[in-house]
Image (cartoon, helix red, strand yellow):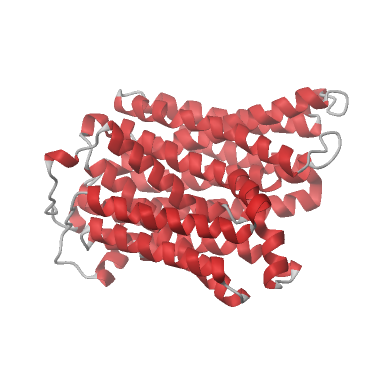
Amino acid sequence: MEQCSKLSPAPTTIIAPATQMSAAMTLLFAAAVGVIVTNLYAVQPLLAAIGVTMHIPGGAIGLIAMLPLLGYTCGQFLIVPLSDLHENRRLIVRLLAGCAACLGVAMFSAHAWLFLTAIFLAGVLSSAIQMLVPMAAFMSEEAHRGRVIGNVMSGLMLGIMLSRPVAGWLASVAGWRAVYGLLALIVALLALVLARVLPERHPQQNQRYGDILKSLWQLLRTERVLQYGALTGALSMAAYMSYWTTVALLLVQAPFSLGAGGIAVFALVGASAVFATPFAGRAGDSGHGRLASHLSHLAMLAAALIAGMAGSGWGGFDVHAHAGPALVLLGAAAILLDGGVAADQTLERRKINLLSPQLRGRLNGLYVGFLFIGGAIGAALSGFAWKLGGWTAVCMLQLLFSAMIVLLAAKARPA
């Protein structure tokens, strides 16, 4: 924390008592981040339909799924630091208004280049999420900050987990353009609501944007809590994406032979893990964060082992003779993995948001940026693993990422 305090003096902040975090305000924040994050993942079940409409070749169709996430990652490093320079409420509202406009453009696009540009920029502007999380911390008492962040993170994780099945269902009923139209409308309404209810938060004003960007490297080089959180977060997201990128490829094969509807229902199973985040936040507030963190890492490790048993017959389990129990075990692995990842991120976010308040924007931007870098690596490597060795190789990859987290926690966890 000493290193953080050297970067800039304490900020001037304004907050009225009426805008402290109540239960209703926490629910609004959770719903807001859940809605905003949806546009980053909702495109994945729409790839085939969008590719046909936009005449995008099959070899380039992966760009459609990659661009929103790439834009969001860029936003963490280039846009989120602005929250340490400009008044936060106005900045958040403007970003969301721009995001809604880009989603509207994506809905009406007739050309591939315009559509791809729009979803990339929508991803960039969705980085407002990482301004809302520090805003929630700013509005919370320190004794309850972990609980509030955990509840807000519940909305974020629920948005991620529900985005694919909900978007797939809506597209099957009204077409893929309706998904973007509905998202544009909801995000625009959300901007109007937040403009009325968010408090003003004025960070230090005598800084330059270039200096803030330069300070990112200094923070990453000197702040041990950030280093640890970014590394474990990147590994956990790599494990998460290695599972979810390829599990649908497994489920369409015998003995499971699930269709699109069955895969959508399976994706909902992992959403139940969202309940891990409030418990993780409370554990951090009550002084049991280290234990909760270790349990979250062990859950990820167990998920890889169970997934290997259920999909590839590890431990002598006969998958083809017990297809029903195997599917249940795959669901259990999804819950353990999603719950472990969500709990770990909640605990690390809590620690990061207890560091210097004037640096929360940069700290959160760096942390989340590395999460998405890890997720991109996990998704890419899982594709290669599936091609080389099927589900067995994917589970070995997931096991490797999870084991690295456990070893890192045992050797390098900051006090």
Q: Position of residue 73 (x, y in %)?
A: 46, 60
Looking at the rendering, in which quadrant would you find the C terminus? top left
Residue 117: % across, % down: 53, 72
Residue under the image location 47 percent in, 61 percent down: 123
Residue 258 locus on image (x, y percent): 79, 38
Q: How many numbered marks appear?
A: 0
**Image: 224 above or below 151:** below
Q: Quadrant of the N terminus?
A: top left
User: Is residue 232 visible to us here?
Assistant: no
| Foreground of the two, 112 or 189 | 189
Name the residue rendered at 35%, 36% in the picture: 27
Residue at figure coordinates x 18%, y 53% from the top left? 200
Q: How far from the left and from the top, in percent, is residue 75? A: 41, 62
Do we see residue 136 in this rendering? yes
Occupied quadrant, residue 6: bottom left
Quick check: 279 left or right of 207?
right
Does residue 307 appear left or right of residue 200 in this picture?
A: right
* Of residues 175 and 251, the one drawn nearer to the viewer in this rendering: 175
Q: Residue at x 22, y 44 (%)?
A: 138
